[in-house]
Image: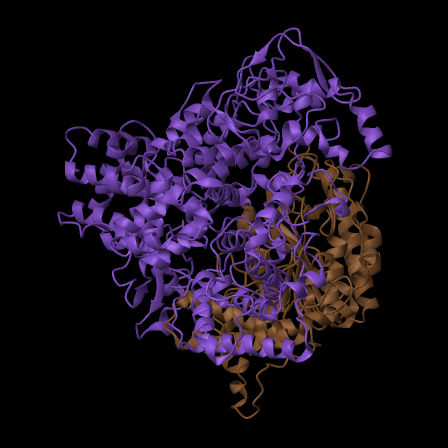
Amino acid sequence: MINSLIREKKLWLFLSLLLATPYSYANKEVQDYYADSVASYVEACLACHLIDGVADSRGARLILSGSGANQDQLNAQTITDFFAFSDVDAALILAKISGGASHGGAQVYAKGSAGYLAIDDLLNLIAGESTDGGPDGGNDFWRGLVLEPPERTLRRAAILFGGKLPKNSQYNYVKKSDANLRSTVLKFMKGDEFHSFLITGADDRLHTEAFNNGMTFEFGFEGDYPEANLWWELDRIATCQEIQTNGDPSDEFRELNTCSLANTLYKFGVVRAPVELIAYIVERNLSYKQVVTAKYSMVNQFTNNVYRSGAAFPKPKAGQALEPSHFLTYKKGSDRGQANYLGAFEGDCDPICRVKKFPGYINRPHAGILTEPAWLARYPTTDTNRNRARARWTFYHFLGVDIEKSAPRTTDAVALSDNDNPTMKNPACTVCHERMDPVAGAYQNFGDFGRYRSKGGTDSLAEAYKYPEWFGGDPADTPYQEGDVWYRDMRKPGLSGKATTRKHGSLQWLGQEIVKDPRFARAAVAFWWPAIMGSDPLVAPEESTDQDYEQKLNAYNAQQAEVDSLAQKFRSKGFRAKQLFADMVLSPWFRAEGFEGGDLQSRMLELATVGSGRLLTPEELDRKAFAIFGTRWNEQNSNPWEPEGWTQLSKGDEKIAYGGIDSFGVLDRARELTALMSNVAERQAVEFACRVTILDFNREKLPDLRNQCAKDAWWETDWEKLECELAAPDPRPALFSNVSKTTEPTDANRAKIETQIVKLYDTVLGKKVTRSHPEVKELYRLLESRWNEFNGQGWADNPCWLGSKNIDDWAWDQKHDPKFMVAAWSSVMRALMTNYWYLHD
Amino acid sequence: MPLRKDLTRRRLLQNALLATSGLALGGLTGSRVLAAPGRYQGKLVVTLQLNGGVDVTSFCDPKVNTPGEPKINHWADNGAPLQAGKISFAPFANNETFFNKYKKDMLVVNGVDAQTNSHTTGILYNWSGRNSQGSPSITALHAAKNSPEQPLAYTTLGGFSQTGGLIRFTRINDINNVRSLLAPNINPWDGEPSRPEAETTAVKNYIDNSLEGLAASSISPRQMATMSAYVEGRNSRQGLASLLDILPPQEDMAPDVYLGTPNGWSSDLLRRIQGALLIFKAGLGSAADLELGGFDSHDANDQWQDPLLSFTAEAVDFFWSYAEELGLADRITLLIGSDFGRTNYYNDADGKDHWPIGSYIVMEKNPAWGNRVVGLTDELHFPVPINPSTLKKDVQNGVNVLPSHVHLALRKHLNLDKFAKQAGFPLDVQSMPLFDASKGTV
């Protein structure tokens, strides 16, 4: 009887509602536990187990509520009722969750995962048993693993975040407690290198830097932002042609003129704004919620002008000398620069679009990254996509949900063959669109490439939708009504069953809803996991028949447990990202370095991304070099066309060859060396080791060198006129402090030289050894053999590009290496720079 | 030695270290330098991944408009499918030249049901043969079995390259950009050693010795894995310099090609093809992935598909011509496919959305199994079941062709089936004799 009633969907919903009243027999403990610990996991079930959902259409008895203020209460009751069926028990429910018992939705949570264990605990509570304390993600996962000493953790974190080596006092301090380690790690989260860490880490996820790496940026300010008309004032065509025809090419970049305009005025600042926003929030210890709720944007001098932000920058002027800082200095601002198209708007598109006449400006709504033009343009929409790509990535980055993975893995063609508004009606489609489309709707105001109400200022709706008669259709076919800003044949803007009626501020509403969602904190942990742990977050294994399934599952569960724990701390500390980063560094996922168990062979895969030993990315290797040597491989001074400077690993072809990304064609980092990458590592040692060695032995020259380099005009492209082709190193403590240029490898000097090798081993590789260590002896022999050869031939063979014309001279080399020891030490440095521990951390 | 599932990373590390120290040969040689592997001269496998979802009804599974149904193709207003041998194709793009020239070199598999509208799943399924994560691409399998010790055993020049942990892939976008890295101790500008050769030897000896110490320490599995890669990379890189000997001057490499898509894209695919084939010519690897994107034509379907399919034809023609020039054509199997197909009707924006049914084209030079079509779709591009033994239409008892069927047949054709099973990646579908020249659907 009950079963037959339940098959009547509406009756079932009514029954659920009824049972959720005070007559409910799901006790308060169950309801509380569900709301606190289970609801976020059941979210995944809502993809199918809703009225008219895929599960419903296939006869499933568990039909949940997808919305409403008492949704949690209802769903706790529904699960309690489902559990009461005579043929249902915990084993069946858990089997279905993990992909068994003919579950149509395949695996939702792997056996033993956090979601699986949370639901297991809920079922125990419903059955009147106590929970086992919640998900723990595998009790024995850490057996056999050994944590590194706190000093080593500190060094790794200091290089990763701050591009610095800790001081001895800091090493001593962190030995005393984890609290000391934590507070000291936090001290390295500041300065330019930390900023660089944040920019790189954020772009690794958002990929907005694609626009600086070849992807076309199609925002089109000139036609919409009156202040972008500045280029008319600059007499664009005449100036640019003159420079390109007759002038010094460097003039193109020397001052703000028409050739440099597009980049200077718009592109760089707009492209960087999303990641600069994240950096601003993190660096100032603001709530990380502002990433999707900030009512401001980040502007540099040029975007400040175009946006009419009112930030404290001077107004750009024709002929203004350009400096890298103009590109890289960001302040809070708002976009108030787009012309209102309504009323007396007049544009001209000959030869390039510009605003000629307009009635006023639009106050573009801000919701952190969600409203940033670069974010919107990186995931552009189309007339039929209708913001779904934006919704997909919003779910992924800020709620930790991979929509594409939420659908059943197989769907037959007949089920997908439907042109009667399938995303609203066809269960095979609604499985994803039920969740995705409301979020797409929240982006309703933003056009194909991110302009606000791009269709005449009234909306961003497709004209084929509004006016089908323009495309050969019947005007009666559209449900569009004057004043609409969203499609009536799609779901209303919203999130997780809640809808918003806001038109102008729907993305601001969405941002506020996202940060209320418990998944936001977990998504933030996952967002920063690659930057700090050096590996992508694990995904649940899908095939239980795979040979390595158990190992992958163990790793996934343990990681999920850690993510849960970190997210909980993140929430409790007010969403302060630096605190989160410090917690992540203290995690064994960062700190494990050795293994002493007997079952290593059976655990290689599950521990494959745990702890130290990551291959440094090109950016991380650059930062490590900077920490140790004060300079990077072939580092050049910054200039307006490379405002962040140029290094071989950050801007050269070696970046991609060494496993880096361009956020455009290459989105995933290589995490292990290949033969070609090994050659990149070799090349950097060949070119870089001698330079840092020679400059360190001639430290008295460094102040002059820095002074000379500072005098160089950045716009000079004729290298003959430059004092320095490479940037002078920043000051660092001496590397060769135990020996001099004349300390030869004799018996009398053996102790000094071996002590020097011990110091290099510690500073460059981060490894503590004693003079008796075999590697110290090996390096001594290497030094000695090189010195012997030079002595035999009577000159030092140390070819090296020092990057300064005053010292790049063979005679200078010989004069400053009277005993050939600088050349011999260069060989030792080369050996260290190809060592596993230099390239990995 | 192929990296097999039963050969753990630790074991591999030990082997790599032993090899480096000369002990892998029983300690008899005393050599401290692992000899570079010889040039690979066996079978070569390449995938050309047309990303986004190709409209195969305008390519190798042509469909005309059906009265009473939404229009499936604009070209069918005035045109009809053409025929090259046994292969039917659409009068669209540059198809006619392409199919007429290569009909004998290809097997067309139509009606392949990816069972999904998701790009992620479609790509995963079409290039690994399995719609769940973890299984290697067909190219990864081939390289792991046939050339695991080569420095560029498996090169991705774009596209899906999942390896299942069997092998590492090398990513190269533009072979021009890695010239200076093929011989890192040589100055690119004058060919002279960058540093004294004695130093290079001394440093190498130091690293080799230090690795023995590292292996003896209590390192973690992650360190072991990255150390293993470090050792293998060092050991195998010696052969890379041989690529320099055959690389044409930069100015002779294929230029970017303007495609004529609505957004004015250009493509460097021809140069990537050149890179893959030159790597093969140097004997440095056995498998490569290539990619051409942009097929996700939700708007203006024909304006996207036409130039992209024309360029696909041009690129495949370049591929075989250049392979012939390098003397490689006889050794290559080329697999062309996509995420899935496109709807059997145009949407409001004259585009076509996602449709689970697609096609593959498998190519070799003059194969016995060429000029054939396997698999079938009806007039609205729904899959029609075929008999898995006879490959003939069999609506009652037949099955729809899945990517897993195609991959199983390819594995058997390339002699990878047993290796894949031993490595823990079986495909649990019925075998179809796609490469049996005596059978076909059409």
Figure disc tally: 0
Compared to residue A226, the image places residue B136 above or below, namely below
Residue A153: quarter of image: bottom left
Identify which residue, A424 or B120, lies in the foreground. B120
Residue B149: quarter of image: bottom right
Which percent across, then down, holds residue A678? 59, 66
Which percent across, then down, holds residue A594? 35, 67
Identify which residue, A354 or B154, lies in the foreground. A354
Compared to residue A231, the image places residue B20 above or below, namely below
Which percent across, then down, holds residue A568? 28, 42
Residue A695: quarter of image: bottom right
Compared to residue A26, the image places residue A817 above or below, namely below
Output the letter for the chain in purple. A
Identify which residue, A219 or A727, lies in the foreground. A727
Where is the N terminus of chain A found, in terms of image quarters?
top left
Give the residue at the far bottom of this rendering. B28
Residue A179 seen in the current view: yes
- B16 vs A399, left or right, is right
Give the residue at the far right of this rendering. A246
The colouring scheme, among rainbow, by chain, secondary structure or one colour, is by chain
Which percent across, then down, holds residue A63? 32, 39
Where is the C terminus of chain A found, in terms of image quarters?
bottom left
Output the letter for the chain in brown. B
Residue B145 seen in the current view: no
